[in-house]
Image (tube, rainbow, N blue to C red):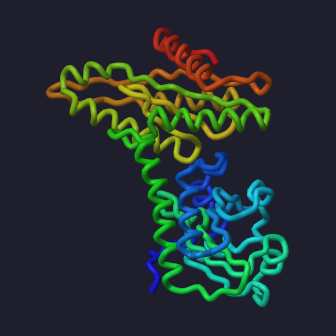
Amino acid sequence: MTRWRPLKTTGITSPGRLRALRQSDLLETGPEPQFDRVTRLTRQLLQAPVAMLSLVAADHRHVKSASGLPVPSSARHDTQLSHSFCHHVVATAAPFTVCDAVSCSLDGAAEAVRELGIVAYAGVPFVAVGGEVIGALCAIDRAPRDWTAADLDGLCDLAEIAHTELRLREAAARDALTGLANRCQLEQAGVLALARAEKARRSQTLFLIDLDGFKAVNDNGGHAAGDRVLREIAANLSRIVAADGLVARLGGDEFAMLPVGSTAADARDAWCRRLEAAATLCVPVGDQHLAISGSVGLATSKPTARLGWDALLAAADADLYRAKARRRPRSL
């Protein structure tokens, strides 16, 4: 009996699965030693000529790591889904094996044999932190092979190592108090967002939110009261932003929001109002109620001018300083 845990089946094109794949930040990064070690161990443990860690997008498969492929093949990271068996692993959310692709009637078997030389295949789910199957760890043989339960057990154990790497990254990227992304995670996401914006010749906006009146809560109610305020505002921000962007805590009482895609001027104005509303609270402290409000600053890159992350952050911080001094009305 193989040691794989039952997973929910969501389908290749499920929005939640594709969102988890994007948020993993694995599609747009190069080879990484943590995952290369997993594919090398897979190849050694299963005595297979080739091992791969593949990510399955809506219309193609991306090879995150490979061991045993010749250099020209290794350089070709993206292939059609019809040219691999990894999408079957994702579709079923379970281990999948092919003993002899030459005599297999599955869709794509002929292409896999002809284009990639796959004759025998064994793959298990590669799972994101949230439980979504975003790809597959697989072993490939150039000759027919009867995969054993021990083979699949070994694959499952190694896929769990790759999953643990994602969990460690998630923990390192989270603010311990609020559960939001931390400054390091925001920077990584911001650099990728700016690169995408430059490639697509569009703008990218960054919002910063700073709390007004927070010091009075700490002074009168202690740090426990302050922590409760930060957690509540973090929850408010997460709720209104949802899948439309990344919310992060930069430290102290300062937060940030990095929206997905481009935002027009009227949308930026609407976001400012929503973010300010999310940061507005009336906090009971002893026999008094203290008002918390939020100031919002922003900066937007231009499609025609290259702007680095540090420059975007500095521009948003300068606008936040002006907003705190102005407190309304604000100009975009």
At horizontal 75% and vertical 84% (from top left) the residue drawn is: 101
Measuring from the top left, give residue 303's x and y in whole percent. Answer: 77, 27
Left or right: residue 36 versus residue 75 is left
59 vs 212, left or right, is right
Q: Residue furthest left?
A: 287
Q: Position of residue 233 (x, y in %)?
A: 38, 35
* 120 up-or-down from 127: above or below: below
Q: Is residue 67 left or right of residue 156?
A: right
Residue at 49 percent of width and 72 percent of height: 156
Q: Position of residue 259 (x, y in %)?
A: 60, 37
The C terminus: image quadrant: top right
**Residue 298 occupies quadrant:** top right
- Residue sitting at 47 percent across and 9 percent down? 325
Q: Is residue 65 left or right of residue 103?
A: left
Say above or below: 34 vs 232.
below
User: How many numbered badges does the structure rendering display?
Assistant: 0
Quadrant location of the N terminus in the rendered image:
bottom left
For this rendering, which residue is in front, 279 or 30? 30
The front one of 169 and 256 is: 169
Residue positioned 59% across, 69% down in the render: 43
Q: Position of residue 262 (x, y in %)?
A: 70, 35
